[in-house]
Amino acid sequence: MELFNVVRLVAIAAIILLFYVASLVLYRLFFSPIAGFPGPKIAAITGWYEFYYDYWKDGKYFLEIEKMHKRYGTYVDLSNMGDTSNTSDWARPIVRVNPEELSIHDPEFYNEVYVTESKRRTNNYAMFAKGIEWEGHADIKTDSHFLTIDHDLHKSRRKPLEPFFSRKGVSAFQPMFAEFVKKLESRLDSLSGTGTVIRLDHAFFALSGDIMAKICFDDGKGYLDDEDFAPEWFALIHMLIRSVPLFTGLPFLAKLMKYIPESFVLRVYPNGVGFTRYKTMAMAHIQEVKSEKAALDKQSIQPDNFSLFRFVVNSDMPESELSDDRLVKEAQIMLAAGSATTARVLDIITYYVLANDDIHARLEEELKDIMALWPDRVPSWTELEKVEYLQAVIKEGLRLPRVFPNDALQYKNWTIPAGVPVGMSSYLMHTDPTVYPKPDEFNPSRWIVSINPAIHRSFVPFTRGSRNCLGMNLANAELSLAIAVLFRPNGIGGKLNLFETTEKDVKHVHDFISPMPDVNSKGLRVSIG
């Protein structure tokens, strides 16, 4: 009798589960606010389809979305959307990529999706935030500005940071950038003629890591001084980046991380001690600048004794947003994102310049005057911006690789309900052959000879709107100086030779938080002649 009761309970549970799954499938296919939008049914039914490509296929869902746009976004019969006024096939590049999210590929519509707050409030996509919140997305009070979902709270957290990352703020750091770039140049030059093969991607990561540590904590970490350019720092951040699809697809794992002893995590992954040290250092620095606040006159802060968190603590940010835990998370995100993105673009640019003698020669020629007195004279960022071909090279490196809670969004004849996550892929924007002919080709000249205004309209490496990249001025200033120093006439760039490195070692193949090359790549390797 007891066995019978157990079997009956299991059967009832199975029936309830089956009914729930069937109801969920029916709702998502026929009754969801976005049920009528085109796309593969499997993507509409379950998020496991996206998880499969992003986790098991190592960040390949962006390529699957590209295929969806080609298959489903070309011609759609309006009659199945209840439009009886026009039942003919009509081109519309919009697809449903998971049960709750839409993707649009239409360069002319980008500025309608990524808008400033004066036009429309914009919330962050909660699933995206969960994928980056490795310690558990449980407390809204401790989120960084980058992960904050609510529009108004995001604004209150970001606004006090903006002066620090403004053109004026970033320009003040040019001497500091120069010191680190000089150190990189000196390290590379010391290896000249030795036949040593180095991982230049590690060197660039060390450069950006030292700069970000100096900016965040007023303390460069000395990665450039490490004999091998701190490969453990490179490995740590890339491990975190590659973990994003796992935590996005299985968000409960992020919450579980809070309960796993740190000692156990470090036993499993010893290199993780680097991030633990940064967390400790961030906490110490934040507590230090808080203790200074009462005695420190805001006007006395000078760029040579300056850090982001000294600036924040002395800003108009509400006291409620200045908790140690929240600022530490802000520091962790800033450090990881600022290191990985700039280093990645340096990899791409350096590979293509070294692989193309014409580009290399033209870049050297255009840098000969402005860099003639380096290192005694450091050109300003404004001066470097006027070197047309340098900026074209940087744009080409950047080119190669939002939720509206209160308002419905109208895209042509489609009404996107309020609260539906909508995204537009910079990958698709930057590889659109109607805007960028031969989009896979590294061609800086396209930015100089083009008369097509769409080339600039479709260029969105930092996105746009109220949630655009806070550090875009910082990235552009770093890139401008680093590339100018490396590839000036008689610079170290002229001694670099690619070693068993091909385009596949830098080309965008995977998409986690940021684009990444083949996971089996041995990196950007060079010998120094």
Image (spheres, rainbow, N blue to C red):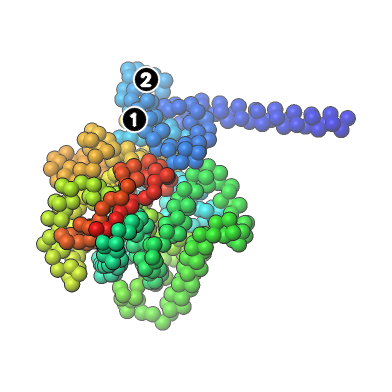
Image disc number at residue 103? none
In the rendered view, would you say 268 is above or below 287? above
Q: Tag 1: residue type?
A: Pro
Q: Could you tell me how far apart the alpha carbons at marks 1 and 2 are, in whole angstroms?
A: 13 Å
484 to the left or right of 77: left
Where in the figure is residue 237, as x and y percent of width and height?
A: 44, 55
Could you say which is closer to the camera, residue 418 or residue 49? 49
Q: What is the quadrant of residue 15 in the picture?
A: top right
Circle 1/circle 2 CB separation < 8 Å: no
Circle 1 residue: 93
Quarter of the C terminus within the rendering? bottom left
Residue farthest along the right direction in this orientation: 1
Q: Tag 2: residue type?
A: Asp
Where in the figure is residue 108, as x and y percent of width and height?
A: 26, 37
Name the residue at 84% across, 29% down: 4
In the rendered view, would you say 153 is above or below 163? above
Could you say which is closer to the camera, residue 356 or residue 280? 356
Circle 2 residue: 77
Q: Secondary structure at mark 2?
A: strand
Could you say which is closer to the camera, residue 86 or residue 5? 5
Going from the N terminus, do you reach mark 1 or mark 2 first?
A: 2
283 to the left or right of 444: right
Could you say which is closer to the camera, residue 517 or residue 148? 517
Q: What is the quadrant of residue 308 in the picture?
A: bottom left
Name the residue at 45% across, 27% down: 40
Tell me, yes or no, if residue 275 can be seen here.
yes
Quarter of the N terminus within the rendering? top right
